[in-house]
Amino acid sequence: MKKENEKANKIKRVMAIHDIACYGKSSLTVVLPAMSALGAEVVPLPTALLSSHTGIKNATFLPLDKEMHAILNHWESEKVDFDCIYSGFLGSADQIDTVLSVFEKYPSAFKAVDPVMGDNGVKYKTYTDEMCEKMVRLVTKADIITPNYTEACMLLNMPYEEFPDLSKVETAARKLCELGPRTAVITGVREGDNIINVAYDRKEGVFTGSCKYVKRRYDGTGDLFSSVFFGLMLENGDVKASLSRASEFIRDVVKYTAENSENDIILFEPLLWKIKEQ
């Protein structure tokens, strides 16, 4: 019994494969504090160094393909093990291949993919057709994915609609799971005054989480949602409860930011305590 409790209370080690966007609060500057607040040990594998997130014009961009290989080789020599592999923004086709090889090296790890490819119907400038094709391969190896609707359409090669009917989003989530994942959550779908996160799980079926729509854009909320959602999944394994709590947390963060700041950078740090308290 003691050994079972020790296993249950073991701190989960997460390999976070994301970029470092120095200004603007996104990627690793969000992933590290959010997942750490949930009790995980977050080990970053940086994919690129940017002066800011890509929502800000003229951001510098330095891919770290070579350094990623060196870091992984060092970890392997030190026999560092991981409970979760969590990939986000990837800066090249080679980096997607690297993540695929990481999945093979850690077969028992929980594999979470946020396929950062585009938004609002537009592919990101750093993304190539080859990267899109390889991202489909990566998704097939994942346990759980969190694309926005633009990314879901890209993965499924289907036309994008600005305001899709929820039934179409549900169908897309089902089709994404047919590619391989156990769970697919399509994030940030606008319906009236709400933002809906639509999920399909092979065991639980279709379910949703939602928060109120605020007429301001906050880059990094997708990274924050995925980090909290995946962190909660590692903690309790309850996909429905994790989606609900992550959606509620984003609702609270967006409301707090809108009430306390005039700029477009999310203020989530003062509310991190809520992740554990919900």
Image: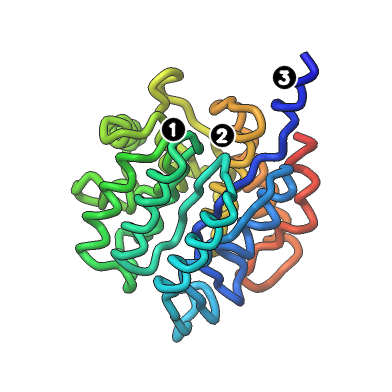
The reply, left or right, for residue 204 in relation to residue 124 is: right
Does dot 2 land on a helix, a strand or a loop? helix
Decide which of tag 1 and tag 2 comes sooner along the chain. Answer: 1
Name the element at disc 3.
helix
Say which residue appears at 65% left-offset and 63% top-offset: 266
Q: Residue at x 60, y 32 (%)?
A: 242
Indicate the position of residue 51 as horizontal and vertical percent values: 54, 81
| Residue at the farthest front position | 77
Count up the numbered dots: 3
> Can you say whether 228 is above or below 30 in the image?
above
Q: Where does the image place residue 197, in percent across and percent down from the top left?
A: 48, 39
**Considering depth in this image, is 213 or 173 the residue closer to the camera?**
173
Amino acid on which disc 3 is placed = Glu
Real-space Cα distance between discs 1 and 2?
8 Å
Dot 2 or dot 3, earlier in sequence: 3
| Mark 1 burial class by Cα count in 10 Å: few <14, some 14-19, many 20+ | many
Q: From the viewer's perspective, is 153 left or right of 116?
A: left
Q: CA distance from mark 3 to mark 1?
A: 31 Å
Say which label, 3 or 1, has the lower sequence index: 3
* Residue 263 in picture, x, y percent from top left: 65, 73
Q: Amino acid at mark 1?
A: Ala
Give the labeled residue for mark 3. Answer: 4
> Alpha-carbon distance for marks 2 and 3?
27 Å
Query: Is 217 situated above or below 157?
Result: below
Disc 2 residue type (three-letter): Leu
For the N terminus, the quadrant is top right
- Residue annotated with mark 2: 243
